[in-house]
Structures are given as C-alpha cells and as structure tokens.
C-alpha cells in the first residue's frame, strides 16, 4: 500500500464522523492538502486501543509508564487495531459486546509501540493502515514534508499553466506570511492537472526555501485553507534543481514573491 492509502467500505448507518480527527480522516482521503492536518490530529488526539483484560476506569485517558504491562489486542496478521472513537469499535456490528480498552494520545501510543503496524478503524467506512516507517516519520516530524511532495510517474503527462482567475487574495496573504519567514527566497503559482485525471486543474504553489518545507508547510497550508476553503485542493512543492515542474516555474513564470 502507498503511504496514504485509505480504504473505504460500503456505507451503512454510522455516527461517522463524530469528531475532528474523523472529519480530517475523511477529507485527507481525497485531498492531499489536508493530510498534514490529519497527521497532526492523529498525533495529538486521543486514540482507542483494545486490551486483553484491562478494564477502562472512569478517568478514561491513561498515561502509561515504561514498565507498565499492558497487552494490546493484535489481529492474526500482526496489525494492532486502533480507533478514532469508542463508537468505531462497534461499526458494522462486527464487535457485538463491550470490550476492554484504553485511550491514549497518539504520540504516547506510537512511542510505546515502535515497530508495530496499526490498522485505523478496521470496521469503519474510512480507515487506514499505519506502517512502522510512516509512524516513525510522524514521530520525528519528517512526514510533514513528505505529504507536500507530488509523486509523478515517468510516463504521466502533466498539464501545467496559469489560472484563468488569478487568486489575488491568496497571493497577497501568502506574500505577507513569507515576509516573516526568512527561509523563503521566492514563491511561484500555477495550476496543474494530470492528463488522464477526471479532476479539474487545481492550484500549485512552488516555494524556493532554504532547508526543509516542513518548517513552514503547516503555516502555509492553514493560511491557504482559510482563504480558498477546505473543499478546494492546493498543492505545495519545493523548488528543486533538475526537476521538470520546478524548471517550468523558474524559466516560464515570474515569482509572485521574492525575498528582499
């Protein structure tokens, strides 16, 4: 499976989504620009894991010390089921009776279980496999740079050009943000579309940045979402040498922002 493969099952009646993390999971399944927010919520929100013989107390959230002996339920294939809310345990009616569980902040859970593979919401309409490499990238923060990258296969034709309606407000607000971020040297704008995709062209912002995109990607994504709305798609890429898309921006367009 790919880094962000989300599975969808046949829809039945469900309370899904019932919290912010679940709403972000749904959005991230089709909008690459929403994935940073999903991963952030996954790291800092409470997650539910099933246990063998451990009964949840009234406190709900548990903080486990290193020597605490808690046995998590594991599927036959080695995956550990994890849920975004207690109701997700009982989706599709597969689990019919109350089961013991604990809730932990995602960062704590993944830190205690390094090397494990998780399956998020295995019984729900929206779920996701979380592989060890992905979890490690989540914990060290490098995943927030990866989610802004575009994977374009060699035989894929990319249609890139300028938008028919220039997003003036977005450009102005991003320029104001970049003035405060000294690592940004310049920024460019275009629209992009994969030739065989049925989706219409969407905005792409190319940023010439010193260092990693992860240092500003969260701020840029949040600002863009406020202006263009949560339903619109926008990609952010880093200007790199010997990259066809980067060469388009450098050679055929003028930056809308240049560091002075």
Image (cartoon, helix red, strand yellow):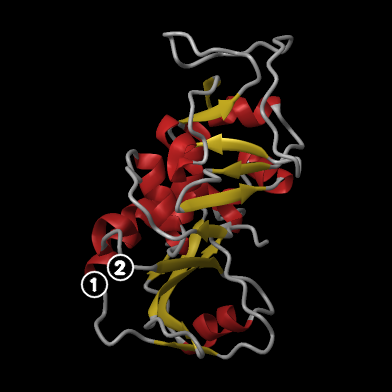
The local crowd at label 2, few if under 14, some if 14 to 19, many if 20 or more residues have their Cα within 10 Å, is some
Depth order, front residue of 138/23? 23
Residue on which disc 2 sits = 171
Q: Is residue 167 above or below residue 7?
A: below
Judge left or right: residue 225 versus residue 55: left
Q: Residue 243 in the image: x percent, y percent? A: 65, 79
Question: Contact, CB < 8 Å: mark 1 with mark 2?
Answer: yes
Q: Nearer the viewer, residue 57 or 34?
A: 57
**Position of 54 relative to 122 (above/below):** above
Q: Which mark is residue 168?
A: 1
Q: Residue at x 41, y 54 (%)?
A: 26
Q: Position of residue 77 (x, y in %)?
A: 75, 44
Q: Residue at x 60, y 13 (%)?
A: 54
Expressed as whole percent of the image width and height from the top left, the position of residue 71 reads 70, 20
Could you classify mark 1 by the number of other residues whose Cα lies within 10 Å: few (under 14), some (14-19), or many (20 or more)? few
Residue 176 visible in the picture: no
Badge 2 marks a residue whose secondary structure is: helix
* Circle 1: element type: helix
How many numbered marks does the figure carry? Answer: 2
């Amino acid at each position: 499976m790919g880094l962000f493969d989300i599975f969808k099952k046949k829809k039945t009646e469900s309370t899904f989504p019932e919290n912010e993390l679940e709403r972000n999971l749904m959005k991230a399944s089709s909008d690459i620009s929403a994935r940073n927010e999903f991963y952030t919520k996954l790291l800092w929100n409470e997650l539910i894991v099933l246990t063998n013989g451990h009964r949840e107390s009234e406190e709900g959230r548990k903080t486990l010390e290193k020597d605490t002996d808690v046995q998590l339920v594991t599927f036959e294939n080695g995956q550990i089921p994890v849920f975004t809310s207690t109701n997700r345990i009982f989706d599709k009616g597969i689990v019919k009776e109350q089961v013991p569980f604990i809730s932990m902040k995602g960062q704590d859970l993944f830190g205690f279980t390094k090397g494990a593979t998780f399956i998020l919401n295995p019984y729900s309409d929206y779920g996701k496999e979380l592989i060890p490499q992905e979890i490690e990238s989540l914990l060290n923060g490098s995943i927030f740079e990866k989610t802004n990258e575009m994977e374009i296969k060699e035989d894929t034709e990319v249609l890139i050009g300028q938008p028919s309606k220039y997003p003036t407000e977005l450009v102005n607000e991003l320029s104001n943000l970049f003035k405060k971020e000294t690592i940004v040297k310049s920024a460019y704008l275009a629209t992009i579309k994969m030739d065989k995709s049925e989706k219409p062209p969407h905005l792409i912002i190319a940023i010439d940045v010193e260092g990693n995109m992860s240092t500003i990607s969260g701020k840029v994504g949040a600002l863009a979402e406020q202006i263009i709305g949560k339903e619109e798609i926008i990609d952010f890429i880093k200007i790199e040498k010997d990259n066809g898309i980067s060469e388009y921006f450098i050679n055929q367009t003028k930056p809308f922002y240049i560091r002075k």
